[in-house]
């Protein structure tokens, strides 16, 4: 049985950038670019007409109000998850985009590998932030949302769990952690689940905040946030199409 392809729309006004994105994504057997646009108006039109699973949306379109256009796309296609492509690394821009409905925020100078990681994460129902800016959002959460302290102390963790906690908070993926510690990815996932349970946490941003408070990592280090706490739609199952 042929694999169901995930439907994607690209909105980017720079022709070379847009064509490059189309070539990169179309080369993936499980992805299908079903539409392209060059401005915010076309983004809304394509979202309403095609109802894609994912929209890769530039936030630097001419005459483009990023947050409002994000909200407009979400209004006409609530099930579409949006990956924002940006140049602005400021806390205000990042948080505004996330609050308006972006499920991921990737810088335009990111690598193709990171773009694919962001797309896969967003399609899987996670949040994704370029590691270089993730610490900005962690700092924002610590300063403005006052994340609840974990009921357990990190002193209750095993040495291995503390190692996994530090590496997860620094933004490393399970496969990379497994290779670094000589474990299997499944074992790393089990350690991460145990960490969440022991510490009473439910998200990577909370885990990262705890690690920062305990001095295991600092806010300037790389990290990646997961979860759908800022209103991203649940990912559609490919089998539902």
Image (cartoon, rainbow, N blue to C red):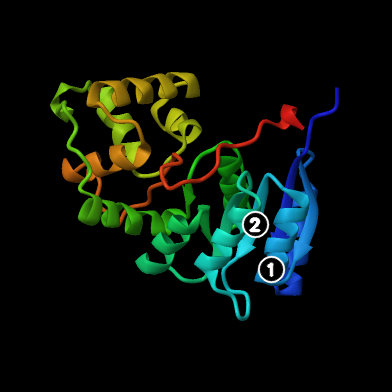
Q: Are marks 1 and 2 in contact (CB under 8 Å)?
A: yes
| Residue 109 seen in this snapshot | no
Q: Residue furthest front?
A: 75
As drawn, is 181 to the left or to the right of 166? right
Name the residue located 68 percent from the left edge and 62 percent from the top edge: 44
Name the residue located 58 percent from the left edge and 45 percent from the top edge: 117
Say which mark, if any, is on residue 168.
none
Residue denoted by label 1: 12
Indicate the position of residue 171 as horizontal and vertical percent values. 40, 44
Task: Tell me if mark 1 has few (under 14), some (14-19) or many (20+) residues whose alpha carbon lies within 10 angstroms of its own.
Answer: many
Residue 166 higher or lower than 102, as above or below: above
Helix, strand or loop for disc 2: strand
Question: Which one is earlier in the sequence, the residue at label 1 or at label 2?
Answer: 1
Indicate the position of residue 200 as horizontal and vertical percent values. 25, 26
Q: Residue furthest bottom?
A: 63
Name the residue located 62 percent from the left edge and 58 percent from the top edge: 73
Indicate the position of residue 97 as horizontal and vertical percent values. 47, 61
Residue 187 higher or lower than 205, as above or below: above
Residue denoted by label 2: 56
Residue 184 higher or lower than 73, as above or below: above
Indicate the position of residue 135 as horizontal and vertical percent values. 33, 55
Q: Nearer the viewer, residue 149 or 72?
A: 72
Name the residue located 36 percent from the left edge and 35 percent from the top edge: 203
């Amino acid at each position: 049985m042929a694999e169901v392809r995930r439907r994607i729309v690209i909105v980017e006004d720079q022709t070379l950038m847009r064509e490059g994105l189309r070539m990169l994504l179309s080369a993936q057997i499980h992805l299908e670019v079903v539409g392209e646009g060059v401005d915010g108006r076309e983004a809304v039109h394509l979202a309403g007409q095609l109802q894609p699973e994912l929209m890769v949306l530039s936030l630097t379109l001419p005459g483009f109000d990023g947050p409002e256009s994000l909200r407009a796309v979400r209004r006409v296609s609530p099930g579409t998850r949006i990956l924002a492509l940006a140049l602005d690394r400021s806390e205000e821009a990042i948080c505004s985009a996330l609050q308006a409905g972006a499920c991921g925020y990737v810088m335009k100078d990111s690598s193709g590998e990171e773009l694919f990681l962001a797309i896969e994460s967003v399609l899987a129902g996670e949040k994704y932030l370029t590691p270089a800016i993730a610490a900005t959002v962690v700092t924002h959460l610590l300063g403005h949302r006052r994340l609840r302290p974990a009921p357990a102390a990190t002193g209750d963790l095993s040495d291995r769990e503390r190692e996994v906690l530090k590496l997860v908070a620094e933004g490393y993926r399970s496969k990379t952690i497994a290779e670094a510690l000589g474990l299997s990815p499944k074992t790393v996932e089990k350690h991460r689940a145990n960490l969440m349970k022991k510490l009473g946490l439910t998200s990577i941003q909370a885990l990262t905040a705890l690690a920062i408070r305990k001095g295991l990592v600092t806010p300037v280090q790389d990290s990646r946030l997961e979860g759908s706490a800022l209103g991203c739609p649940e990912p559609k199952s490919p089998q539902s199409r």
